[in-house]
Amino acid sequence: MAVYTEVTDDEVSAFANLYDIGGVMSFKGIAEGVENSNYLLQTTTAVYILTLYEKRVAPADLPFFLGLMEHLAAKGVPCPTPIQALDGKTLHELSGRPAALISFLPGLSVKRSQPHHAAGVGEALARLHMAGGDFAMVRANNLSVAGWRGLAGATATRADEVRPGLAGEIAAEIAEIAAHWPTALPQGVIHADLFPDNVFFIGERLSGLIDFYFACNDLFAYDIAICLNAWCFERDNSFNATKARQLLSSYQRVRRLEPDELEALPLLARGSALRFLLTRLYDWFNQPAGALVTPKDPIEYLNKLRFHRTVRSPAAYGLAG
Amino acid sequence: MAVYTEVTDDEVSAFANLYDIGGVMSFKGIAEGVENSNYLLQTTTAVYILTLYEKRVAPADLPFFLGLMEHLAAKGVPCPTPIQALDGKTLHELSGRPAALISFLPGLSVKRSQPHHAAGVGEALARLHMAGGDFAMVRANNLSVAGWRGLAGATATRADEVRPGLAGEIAAEIAEIAAHWPTALPQGVIHADLFPDNVFFIGERLSGLIDFYFACNDLFAYDIAICLNAWCFERDNSFNATKARQLLSSYQRVRRLEPDELEALPLLARGSALRFLLTRLYDWFNQPAGALVTPKDPIEYLNKLRFHRTVRSPAAYGLAG
């Protein structure tokens, strides 16, 4: 949870006046999003999310993120749409931070996912990949192989405090994964962080995808690998192949995976697990003073990484063959 | 800000099914209320506040608080109304805590109050006092003189860490205030915590009073004294007599203060300042592990206490005489 910046009633009223959205009726900080401050803004006409971008989001990336949400929403992907102010722009400033007003999406994120949730995610992810095809802007994935090396270097001296031998295991993983990392697979815009927190459902229906602040250009199959890690492990770290099969088969009903993509899944899933292991490890050692966020356990992702290391074929992910 | 208890989507859906409120569309933890966990619950029919009572609120007091809100709302006081479930009750359990669903009040709390805000507060406070007249339940004020002694005892050994001589100054204040504390003034149900955080405005109009979890039976004039402290000091600790006059005169347009009540105001304001000094001091030394709340500065209330100690007549509060 978050809400780092306090906004006064005068400031929010002045901000709302930049838009054609009616008068402010209510404004509440909400416990959503880890990187930014989020508020629920109710006006006389509708409810919106107001996001203040805190320092972990690079201002230079905001036009990509906001432009992508506009693009995807226009294509029918159920994601938040940045609202244009009277000046036609979607990015303004509030309390000294970049700020955007975004459409409100109803729905609840699931704490204990079922196979049908994984199916919904697979389909939505494929639709996102297709809809992003003609998005004109490009953002490199700074949390791919080169980024892992930076995070490994920044955590190497202390990693063994979390688990003896961890620094060495990470170094060996990076070397091996980088040596085999695929480059010729289909790519485009990926979400790159489609965890249960970032997916809303109303009943059994997927109603929204949120938090596009890690979106970038990378391999589509890597985005699938992130979802396998985020949606298909149980709390006891066991892998639920039924959920994986649902996720992959629903994805493929929208966008067929090429044989090379399927073949690469175990390595991509291993790389994805390494990515979250590294960022969690970094956050573990670098908790900002006064942060309201409980750091997440890095070891969960070490366990996932080790699982994928044992996988010899995508059949382990519940596929027919 | 708060939100201590995490509630799963399954739990909130099951809770909503206890009520005739439609299907759950959205559920978000909000940064409101320090003592409890609060969530904004949107259903297919309306928006509600869902409150989980954390351990600082005594479960035995909940029927008083919820009953009072129901009573006041029925009398037209703009305060939240507890919603009755299908079983006719307003109090249930969620995630192992007492929980209530409460009507949503629109409005913003003001960060920099103006004299007209103080006027609105005075009028609303008088209406609250009048409307509580025929409320049948009674709750003693555990933060009056006897309670101060307990807090002073619990903080005496460390108070001087905050300001040298503070423990002695507190002991002398309690002795003197207790010796002169009035007992024969008009009394009834008071809010006892009507700070700017707990009052909503839409434009210049007061739209709501919230957070009745300190409400109790005590002197009406003591509630006014709390508001003088909460609304009439500027950030530099200077006393704004214009706001005080607005507050008192608006109050009196609804309920005339007796001469004895006016006469007692300086002492009551001094006692009220002492009460918040003591609870802030206690919280300063007893921050719960993992709390998301920044403790408030006790010294702000030492300064207010010292101001009221110099006041010889209610004329200092902007009254004509």
Image (tube, coloured by chain):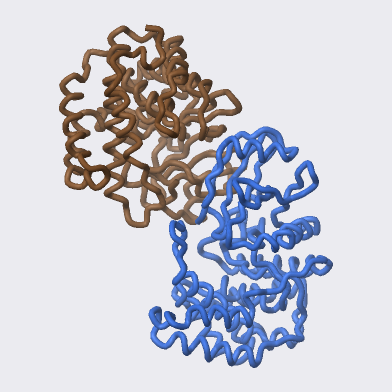
Chain colours: A brown, B blue
Q: Which residue is drawn at 65% across and 69% down?
A: B119
User: Which of B197/A257 is in front?
Assistant: A257
Residue A78 placement (x, y as % from top left): 50, 25
Residue B12 placement (x, y as % from top left): 62, 39
Residue A307 placement (x, y as % from top left): 32, 26
Total count of labels: 0
Q: Vertically, is A147 above or below B255?
A: above
Regarding residue B27, the answer to whether it shows in the image is: yes
Q: In this view, does A217 lie to the left or right of B58?
A: left
Q: Can you tell which quarter of the image residue A70 is in?
A: top left
User: Which of B312/A225 is in front?
Assistant: A225
Q: In this view, does B50 lie to the left or right of A246?
A: right
Regarding residue A217, the answer to whether it shows in the image is: no
Rendered-image quadrant of the C terminus of chain B = bottom right
Q: Vertically, is B158 above or below A23?
A: below
Q: Vertically, is B131 above or below B237?
A: above
Q: Residue at x 35, y 26 (%)?
A: A226
Residue A245 placement (x, y as % from top left): 44, 15
Q: Vertically, is B147 above or below B200?
A: below
Q: Is residue A257 left or right of residue B27?
A: left
Q: Residue at x 36, y 52 (%)?
A: A96
